[in-house]
Amino acid sequence: MARVFEPWAYGDAPRAQCFWNEAASLPEQPALDGDVVADVAIIGAGVTGLSAALHLARAGEKVAVLDANGVGWGASGRAGGFCCLGGGKISNAALTKRFGLQGRKEYRAAERSAVEYAQGLVEDNGWEVNRHSKGETLLAHTPRHWRAMQDEVTEIEADYGVTPELLPAEELRQNGMGGPFHGALTIPIGFAMHPRRYVEQMASAALNAGAKVFETSEVSALERVSQGFELRTVQGVLKAKRLIIATNGYSSEDIPKWMRARTMPLQSNILVTRPLNRDEQLAAGWTTPQMAHDTRNLLHYFRLMPDGRFLFGMRGGVYATPRVTARLRAMILRRFHRMFPAWAHVEVSHLWSGLVCLSRNATPYVGPIPGMPGAFAGLAYHGNGLAMGTYAGMLLSDLVCGRAPHLPYPDAFAAPMRRFPFGLSRRGLLVGANAVLGLADL
Ligand SMILES: Cc1cc2nc3c(=O)[nH]c(=O)nc-3n(C[C@H](O)[C@H](O)[C@H](O)COP(=O)(O)OP(=O)(O)OC[C@H]3O[C@@H](n4cnc5c(N)ncnc54)[C@H](O)[C@@H]3O)c2cc1C
C-alpha cells in the first residue's frame, strides 16, 4: 500500500500520548470476518465516515464501516477540538474567480452551515463533549496583522452574516487574553469540544441506528464488480452496492486508484499541560475559555480547557520519523514557552501528532469519484475537519443515495480534484512552501 509519509506516521506511536485517549470508552468493535454484504461500504471511521454512517443508518440503509485501526484512531480522535469555520485554504478572490460571486457565497454559507450542523448533532442527541468558547478568536501577531484584521470585518459580515468583535491590544489582558498579541477579532461562530467524546458518541449513535463498524480491518484491495464493490481485508470481504471513501490524511495512493497524488498529508502537533491553577493562569494573563489561534501562516492554536489544562497546537511537520518528531516536539515546546513564558516551568503531560490533509484546489472535496459510478469521497479539510468532515459525511449520505443535499453544497466541493506533481515525493513542495510561509511570519 503506497503512502506519502514514513510508515511510522501510520502506526500507533504518534498518538500514544494523546490526551483524549484517556476518555476512550467505546467498546471494541469486531474485525471484518468472512463475507459481509451491505448497501453502502464506508472506508474510514473518523467523523466523515461515521457521520455518513449515522445518517445512512437512520435512513434505513444497511451500512458497514471499515477502519484499519479503530473509531477515531485517525485525525478525528487527535484533533484540538476546535469546531469552527474552515475546511479550505482558498481566498475570497480565488473563490470568486473560479466559482463566481454566487459560488463564493455558497462556499462561505457551507462553512457556517457545517459548524451549525455539528452543533445541532451535539445538542439534538444530547452528546456530552465538554463544550466551551463562544466562537473563535484570532490574535494578531504583529501590528500589521492587527490593522489587516480591522479591514476584514466587512468581509466577515458579508461571508458569514455575523459581526465580529474587535479588541485592541490594551484591552486583551483584562479580557483574559494576555500574551504577545496586538489585537483580537472574535467571530461568534463555533465552539470547542472533546473530539474523542464527539467521535465516539457519533459512532455509538450510528451503531444504535443499525450501522456495523469493523475495526482492525484495513482494506487492502478494492474492486469494482457487476453488483457494486468488493473490499478485501485480511480476514474478510465486504460487498456493497455503493462506496464512500473517508480516509483523509491516512489515505493510500491506490484505494481507489483515483486517489493517486490527489491529497497532501501534513503533520499537526499538540501538547497539553497539567491543570493550571487560577494563580498560574493569572500569571500568564490567559484566563479566557475562548479557543484561539494566531495570525501566522504556520499558525498556533490554543485553548484553556474546562479542567484548567492548556492545549497548544502547531501545524507544519513534513516528515514523520521518531527523530524528526522529537525535533518538532522540542520546537512546539519552545513556541509555547515563548508565547507564555510564565508557564515555562509547567509540566507538559501529553504530546502527540497526526495527519491532516490538503488538496491542490485548496478546498475540501465532497463528491463522486470519476470513473467509478456509485463511489464517492469526502476529504481534504486542511486541518479543520471536525465540523466540515461531519458536514461532508451528511452530504455524502445524500449523494450516495442519489438525493440532492438539502443544505448548502457549493460547486467548489465537487470541482475535479487536481493532482499534485511529483507523485510520492510531493511532500518536497511543502518544504519550500513552509520555509517561505515561516519567513513571512517573522
Ligand atoms: C493534531 C491534529 C489536530 C487537529 N485539530 C483540529 C481542530 O481543532 N479542529 C478541526 O476542525 N480539525 C482539526 N484537525 C483536523 C481534523 O481532525 C480532520 O480534518 C478530521 O478529523 C478528518 O476526519 P476524517 O474522518 O475525514 O479522517 P480521519 O479521522 O483521519 O480518519 C481516517 C480513517 O481512515 C482509516 N483508514 C485509512 N486507510 C484505510 C484503509 N485502507 N482501510 C481501512 N481504514 C483506513 C484510518 O485508520 C483512519 O481512522 C486536526 C488534526 C490533527 C492531526
Image: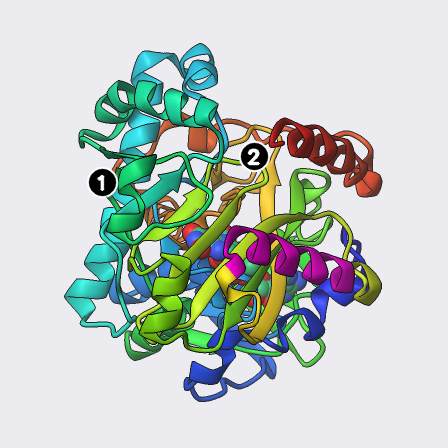
Instruction: Tell me if 100 is positioned left or right of 229 in this view.
Output: left
Residue drawn at 72 percent across, 71 percent down: 11
Residue topped by disc 2: 297
Q: Amino acid at mark 1?
A: His
Where residue 206 appears, as percent x and y from the top left, is 33, 71
**Magenta residue check for 14:** no
When asked about the image quadrant of residue 436, the answer is: top right
Find numbered disc 1 in the image and state the secondary structure of the residue it sits on.
loop
Cβ of mark 2 under 8 Å from ligand 1: the answer is no
Q: Which residue is mark 1?
A: 406
Q: Quadrant of the C terminus?
A: top right
In this rendering, position of residue 223 left or right of residue 280: right
* Image position of 226 (left or right of 136): right
Q: Is residue 420 above or below residue 203?
A: above
Residue 3 in the image, given as x and y percentages of width and height: 76, 53
Secondary structure of the magenta portion, mostly? helix
Task: Name the residue nearer the viewer: 412 or 84.
Answer: 84
Residue 437 lies, with reference to residue 328, above or below; the image says above
In magenta, the rendered stretch is 325-341
Q: Amino acid at mark 2?
A: Asn
